[in-house]
Image (cartoon, rainbow, N blue to C red):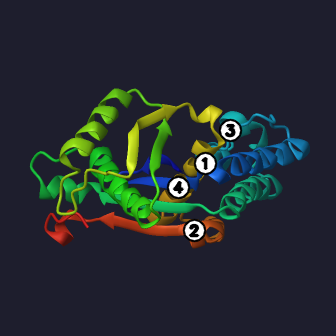
Amino acid sequence: MLLTYIDESYDQTNYWIAALVVPEQHVRSLAQALDAVVQKAAASYPVSRDAELHGHAIVQAVDDWAAMANSQGNMIRARIGVYGDALRAIADHEVAIIVRGVDIQQLKTRYTNPYPPHQVVLSQLLERVQDYAEARDALALVIADEIAEADQHRAAFRDYQEVGTGGYLSSTLPRLVDTIHFAPSKSSRLLQAVDLVAYLHRRLTSRQDTDPRARKANVKLWSYVEPRVTHSHCWEPMAYYGMWV
């Protein structure tokens, strides 16, 4: 079984969803490795051993990581170090990273009443998870951070399984079992792991960091997990005349 953890990250330009595909035999090991990252940080800095590995919180030094908000270079480097330790823990396991996105403005320009970006990207991401599972003769279970619209996404997932995802690569997702399961990220190191991936990927591709030092750090951090990326693509509807590729 492939446990597939998904999380979104977006700005005004692009909407991204990342998937972290973890074979069942690596789930406990990866969770323990991520626990060790937080325990290491807690031993050196004023953070809880139960702190959530949340990308935005670590980078901005808020929430569980607020005590590391000192703007001095040593604390900034320390937070980058925690992020890097977590990404290396992810990369040390036999996982796959799949990322799909859509250009929000082009989606609105191409279609009069487009589906919401989340729905568009999720269906395309699930198609790629299906392909990954099919190639390995495996089944996959999808797990996402709990949200208010969970019932809507479960209903959409059921529609995909019955009539297809739509587009020219439409699939009924035969390798994806049951429904989309939602869980609180606070309680799942694996959901936290995919959050770290999704958040960093969005910052890297959006070029929102104008400070060259920040961009250099982002590139370095991404290099830890880049070998695990099996698919990454942003759909630009105008460029492809509506084809979902």
Quick check: 158 left or right of 3? left
Question: N-terminal of the two: label 1 or label 4?
Answer: 4
Vertical placement of residue 117 versus 88, above or below? above
Q: Which residue is mark 3?
A: 52
Question: N-terminal of the two: label 2 or label 4?
Answer: 4
Q: Say how many tags the image has.
A: 4
Quick check: 132 left or right of 168? right
Q: Amino acid at mark 4?
A: Val
SS class of the residue under badge 4? strand
Q: Amino acid at mark 1?
A: Gly
* Whole-percent x, y for residue 99 in the image: 44, 60
Vertical placement of residue 228 versus 37, above or below? below
Quick check: 177 left or right of 78? left
* Whole-percent x, y for residue 223 in the image: 62, 72
Q: Which residue is mark 2?
A: 228
Question: N-terminal of the two: label 3 or label 2?
Answer: 3
Q: Amino acid at mark 2?
A: Arg
- Say the numbered circle drawn on residue 55: 1
- Say the numbered circle drawn on residue 21: 4
SS class of the residue under badge 3? loop
Query: Residues under labels 4 and 3: Cα distance?
Result: 20 Å
Q: Is residue 14 visible?
A: no
Question: N-terminal of the two: label 1 or label 2?
Answer: 1
